[in-house]
Amino acid sequence: MRVTTIDGLRTAPGRYLEFPVLPAAAALPSSIPPCFNQESHLRAADAGGGAPGTWLCGVFDVPGPVDEDALRDAFQRLVDGHATLRSEFSVSDDDARTVRRAVYLEGGIHVGRPVTAPGSGSEDDEDVAGLLRDRLDAHCRPLRFPNYVLAAISRPDTSTIVCGFDHVHVDALSLAIAIDEVAAAYAGGPHAPRTVGAGGAGGAGHLDYCREEADAAQVDPHDPRLAEWVEFLADAGGHAPEFPLDLGVPIGETAPQYSDEVRLLDAAEADDFSAAAARSGGTTYAGLLTALALATHAAGGSDLLPLTFPAHTRHDERYRRALGWFVTSAPITVSVHDAGRPADPRTIFDRTVADTARELRHALELAEVPLRQVIAATAGGYRPRRQDVFMASYLDYRRIAPAANAFGSNRTHVSNVTRCDDVQLWFSRTDDGIAVRTRHPDTPQAHRTMRTVLRGLRAVLAGVATASDRSEWAA
């Protein structure tokens, strides 16, 4: 799975086909509230006037021209199989700004025959990525329905299948599951078990998860995990930690977003890096966070790197193949163990990575505290200073078991390009190795800063991966 942004998507011209999503009956009001992430996303969209923004899109290639009937059936299975895709949301216009959900029953949404999208110009539009972005921006808005795009780019030799969703319906793992299910169904073979949930056929889905989250008891107000969360935010000034180096964007301002994809390690190097981290008592993710802390420290940052990371909440096996937003946030501070003493980066890495792994495990315990309760417990209230949150995530796509008979090549996770004011990093592991997608302000200072950090990050990773003996590596 390649992870990129819409401006980095390279796809050949072809006949753009969009499969309309048509309600066949009225949606029924539901008592199931959105989850915390969904509610925050919907309230922000309501306050922002519905401007295009956060969507996730998955694309993959199939041989030959598109079989329109087979693909329409595959899209229909996807919509029928996941109740989140049949949910629409609204926000009341009173002071409470209550978020409400309505759900179309299974069979209440009809995926129609494909049409050429308005504004496509011709069947062989050269700017396919630009057209796709326009369609995703137009449709993938939290408070409209449908708020996803099911499409294809048909060509005589190789075609591209498109599944784009507003973030309200999917997280990164859900996106991979969605294109896997569509690929399997399009191939005509068995596909993953249905996960309608909340009264539909099959296993549990995201609506069941939302209901369980709403019914879950809060932790005791004296729970030490809650106190640690509050202290973590207080240390950052009553908001989430920010990237520690200058990005050239004053507080309260944003800049156009710049994104880049960087291949950090090839497959063999990634294996060596993981093995080296394990020998030192760490994990791959702990190793990546340690290397990031070393790189920011070398670039002028503190020897402490506080940040948050997204942690999945699919702890129940019933949710393993469900679509939805199954993510919470976890806090961590990575401490670089140089202790003011001269040491080569590999030695510092060895000293640090085991502690980072312990901090990661502890962070997952803190992630069990509901974020709603964390924010409510913050003295003086949670006061974010920036639009974005400094974070670094990690997803090992090799762990996503494919559905039976799934096929399709060049699977790609595509995100939008908007405005930003902080740094976000998405580390990904595939059969090809380890890569990172970065998102930061498109300012001269941010480019200088991130070039330095990424150069240092690659140097640490390469040094750890290639050292034949832990005493041999030096900067």
Image: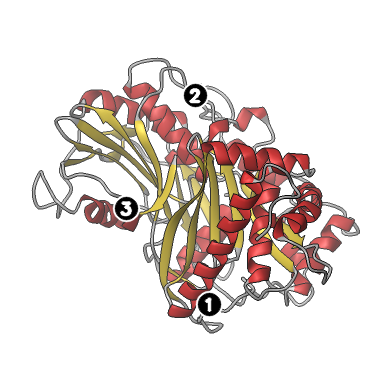
| Residue marked by disc 3 | 136
Residue drawn at x 54%, y 62% as measured from the top left: 454
Residue 426 visible (yes or no): yes
The kind of residue tagged 2 is Arg
**In the displayed structure image, the side of residue 431 where residue 36 appears, left or right:** right
Residue drawn at x 33%, y 17% as measured from the top left: 188
Mark 2 surroundings: few (<14), some (14-19) or many (≥20) residues within 10 A = many
Residue 313 visible (yes or no): no
Q: Which secondary structure lies at badge 3?
A: helix
Front residue of 184/226: it is 184
**In the displayed structure image, the side of residue 217 where residue 423 appears, left or right:** left
Q: Viewer-nearest of labels 1 and 2?
A: 1
* N-terminal label among 2 and 3: 3
| Residue marked by disc 1 | 247
Q: Which secondary structure lies at badge 2?
A: loop
Marks 1 and 2 close (CB-CB < 8 Å): no
* Colouring convention used in this rendered image of the protein: secondary structure
